[in-house]
Amino acid sequence: MPTEKQTERQRAPRRAPQGTRKKSLRGQIVSERKHRVRITLIMFAIVLTIIGLNLIFDEAGFIKYVNLKKEEKLHEQSIAKIEKEIAALKEEIVEIKTDPFQIEKQAREGLGLAKPDEYVFMYAK
């Protein structure tokens, strides 16, 4: 036959000690918070990665910017070269208009003119 202690144990439901129950609930809350923080950080990292990739590889991204800068330098160099040619041609125009030797040279070479006592020999090219 069961003794008094055995019957009391059977009647009374087993309860976890009071401190153990609070710790497990607190632990559960803390672990849920940690889980949420991890998920938030992972999502944040994914969003930053997508934004970073767009900044680098997009139509208006960094690679396109670098290529456009290279093109700009090439165009600036060609503009500088053409401006030098323009300046040289302007000097030549001034010389042709003012220097009598240049005027005579252009008349002889460009128009095929000669002085009255000269002969001009023209060769076919």
Image: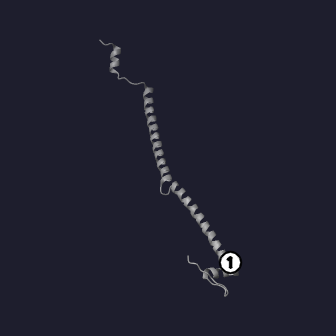
- Residue 101 visible here: yes
Residue 34 in the image, given as x and y percentages of width and height:
46, 37
Which one is nearer the viewer's eye here, 11 or 27? 27
Residue 77 in the image, given as x and y percentages of width and height:
60, 63
Q: Residue at x 34, y 14 (%)?
A: 4
Outermost left residue: 1
Say which amino acid is labelled 1: Glu
Q: Residue at x 63, y 69 (%)?
A: 84
- Establish if 108 lies above or below 44: below
Outermost bottom residue: 116
Q: Which residue is mark 1?
A: 95
Q: Is residue 22 left or right of residue 121?
A: left
Crowding around mark 1 (Cα neighbors within 10 Å: few <14, some 14 to 19, many 20+) is: some
Q: Residue at x 62, y 70 (%)?
A: 85
Quarter holding the C terminus is: bottom right
Outermost top residue: 1
Q: Is residue 66 left or right of residue 115?
A: left
Circle 1 — which element?
helix
Q: Residue at x 64, y 81 (%)?
A: 108
Which one is nearer the viewer's eye here, 89 or 56? 89
Which one is nearer the viewer's eye here, 77 or 29? 77
- Establish if 86 lies above or below 75: below
Which one is nearer the viewer's eye here, 9 or 95? 95
Quarter holding the N terminus is: top left
- Number of numbered discs visible in the structure rendering: 1
Q: Is residue 21 left or right of residue 116?
A: left
